[in-house]
């Protein structure tokens, strides 16, 4: 399946992907109205360590440990390979946050649920908005092989 | 006599995971699930959220409605397996039926353990807190004028308290240990969570136990007495190992299994709360009665029953659990050198030994905790990462560029 990959050497650490993610998932059409003066809770997070910058979001693992660990069956891996969370079933125990080795499943700001990247299939963007707006091509959406 | 390629005894998390494991290798072979509980699998820890009103029965279903049909699973619910004959490869059920298996999974879980307490049999409103039936029974009995006594300040007892706190007059909790959640928290962490629970009305009697009941009065070892209307016993659980033991298989605390999930008996596997795991943090085999572990074991055993080659060699204790918004994550064992950070709301304790992360406690610090669990589970030498940076903030920037490339530049 197509997944998001980061090119660390190209990432400037501008954090624009975080804003684009928060905007995409806000459900508000006007970007300024969606983000201006608000705390944002993006599902992609940029790590900055000196000269090193890179974005982290859900890897949509082939055998996702978050799905196996979910106590309520709220996390699923679809036929399309996308790992999704059914918010209505989630009780916010955050077991998925504890087991994700990437730190890519996040506590949701309103509590009572976790949140994660669903490759913008759950909003009106339809394809990953972080990838589309990365100014340096440091986040890409493509097919790659697993390392043998 | 009917014969089935796969028979699963027990219908909860390990059983569902085993069905998924079997189907990852074998799309067709018939699966029969025999479960004493008269319902399909549900998220067992959700019973406290049910009492809180944060979920309901349909949403508690662990898998969608069509799951069993789509996976060609036959269900025999409300029926118990009475015995296994490993020679003739048959199981005898409580309704008298005998059936044959090619591969058998014992996923019979655990049952509540009641310590000896004189006069307990005369307590009328007495509950456990393990199953949906327990929760429904308690739900009926709750009312604002009732006083509750919970015996056991572990995960089950305290989640029960959270579920009922707002719906009863008072709740008192007794535990033999000197702190709450003694299995997963140190003294500092336990005090923080205790305060959060006390703020919601919990009254604790620690380093104490019930000697005897006289009607609805509990006489404690300390000499104190507690009046109550409802009693919840949440002292602990015992694995259901009898079927394997009586069939001649190796049973210690739990059913002994190898890293493939096989018992000592041919073609018989075990998974979930009835079985042991090899715990890498303590280096011992023990029962890790945790939902994710049941899923990991069930999945591996199921795959192996159908000819797969899954190895489960990195089991570890971990918990993620909240009480009224105070969130607790713990893992591993609390041995070795301690790194500790404390604020009024948060607590972080990291335990390192022999160059490895051996355990941790995180209170109200959930963000990216999985990076710590990865270090622990994969036994990553701390010399291979920037552990000084990781102590304060779990992040992938503390790993080597090669490790990052392996994880972020390819399919995982």
Image (cartoon, rainbow, N blue to C red):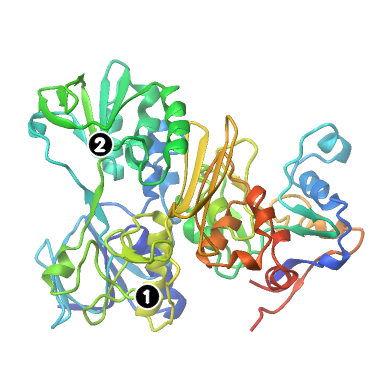
* Mark 1 lies on residue: B259
| Nearest to viewer (mark 2 / mark 1) | 2
Secondary element type, mark 2: loop
Task: Decide if residue B53 is in sight here.
Answer: no
Q: Is residue B370 above or below residue B328?
A: below
Task: Decide if residue B278 is in sight here.
Answer: yes
> First in sequence: mark 2 or mark 1?
2
Tag 2 and tag 1 share a subunit: yes
Query: In the image shown, does A84 or B241 lie closer to the viewer?
Result: B241
Query: In the image shown, does A52 or B336 lie closer to the viewer?
Result: B336
Horizontal arrangement in the rendering, residue A110 relative to residue B200 (left or right): right
Q: Is residue B229 above or below residue B94?
A: above
* Mark 2 lies on residue: B176
Task: Identify the residue at horizontal 13%, vertical 83% (top origin).
Answer: B87
* Number of the label disc, if any, that sits on residue A84: none
**Where is residue B129 shown, x and y percent of the image?**
28, 40
**Where is residue A4 shown, x and y percent of the image?**
74, 65
Query: In the image shown, does B2 or B154 lie closer to the viewer?
Result: B154
Q: Is residue A23 above or below residue A120?
A: above
Quarter of image, res B148: top left
Mark 1 belongs to chain:
B
Horizontal arrangement in the rendering, residue B241 relative to residue A94 (left or right): left
């Amino acid at each position: 399946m197509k997944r998001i990959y980061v090119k660390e050497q190209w990432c400037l650490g501008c954090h624009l992907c975080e804003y684009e993610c928060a905007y995409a998932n806000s459900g508000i059409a006007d970007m300024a109205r969606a983000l201006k003066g608000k705390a944002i809770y993006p599902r992609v997070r940029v790590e900055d360590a000196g000269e090193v910058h890179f974005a982290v979001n859900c890897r949509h693992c082939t055998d996702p440990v978050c799905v196996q660990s979910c106590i309520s069956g709220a996390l699923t891996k679809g036929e399309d390979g996308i790992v999704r969370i059914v918010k209505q079933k989630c009780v916010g125990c955050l077991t998925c946050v504890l087991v994700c080795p990437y730190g890519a499943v996040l506590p949701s700001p309103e509590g009572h649920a976790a949140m994660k990247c669903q490759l913008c299939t759950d909003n009106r963007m339809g394809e990953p908005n972080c990838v589309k707006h990365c100014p340096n091509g440091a986040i890409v959406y493509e097919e790659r092989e697993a390392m043998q | 006599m009917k014969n089935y390629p796969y028979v699963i005894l027990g219908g909860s998390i390990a059983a569902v995971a085993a069905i998924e494991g079997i189907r990852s290798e074998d799309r067709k072979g018939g699966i029969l699930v025999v479960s004493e509980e008269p319902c399909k699998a549900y998220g067992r820890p959700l019973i406290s959220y049910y009492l809180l009103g944060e979920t309901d029965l349909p949403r508690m279903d662990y898998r969608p409605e069509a799951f069993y049909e789509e996976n060609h699973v036959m269900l025999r619910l409300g029926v118990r397996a009475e015995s296994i004959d490993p020679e003739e490869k048959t199981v005898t059920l409580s309704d008298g039926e005998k059936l044959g298996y090619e591969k058998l999974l014992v996923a019979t879980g655990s049952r509540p353990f009641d310590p000896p307490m004189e006069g307990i049999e005369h307590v009328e409103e007495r509950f456990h807190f393990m199953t949906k039936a327990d929760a429904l029974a308690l739900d009926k009995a709750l009312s604002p004028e009732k006083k509750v006594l919970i015996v056991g300040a572990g995960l089950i007892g305290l989640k029960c308290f959270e579920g009922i706190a707002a719906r009863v007059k008072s709740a008192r909790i007794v535990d033999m240990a000197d702190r709450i959640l003694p299995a997963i928290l140190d003294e500092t962490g336990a005090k923080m969570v205790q305060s959060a629970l006390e703020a919601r009305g919990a009254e604790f009697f620690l380093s104490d136990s019930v000697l005897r009941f006289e009607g609805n009065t509990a006489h404690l070892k300390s000499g104190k007495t507690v009046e109550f209307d409802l009693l919840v016993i949440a002292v602990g659980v015992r694995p259901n190992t009898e079927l394997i033991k009586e069939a001649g298989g190796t049973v210690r605390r739990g059913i002994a299994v190898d890293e493939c999930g096989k018992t000592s008996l041919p073609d018989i596997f075990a998974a979930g709360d009835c079985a042991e795991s090899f715990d890498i943090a303590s280096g011992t085999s023990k029962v890790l009665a945790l939902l994710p572990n049941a899923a990991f074991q069930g999945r591996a055993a199921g795959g192996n029953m159908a000819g797969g080659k899954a190895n489960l060699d990195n089991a570890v204790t971990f918990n993620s659990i909240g009480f009224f918004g105070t969130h607790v994550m713990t893992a591993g064992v609390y041995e070795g050198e301690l790194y500790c950070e404390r604020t009024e709301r948060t607590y972080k304790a990291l335990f390192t030994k022999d160059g490895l992360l051996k355990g941790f406690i995180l209170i109200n610090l959930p963000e990216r905790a999985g990076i710590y669990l990865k270090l622990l589970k994969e036994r990553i030498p701390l010399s291979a990462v920037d552990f000084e940076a990781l102590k304060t903030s779990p992040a992938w920037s503390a790993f080597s560029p090669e490790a990052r490339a392996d994880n972020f530049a390819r399919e995982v």
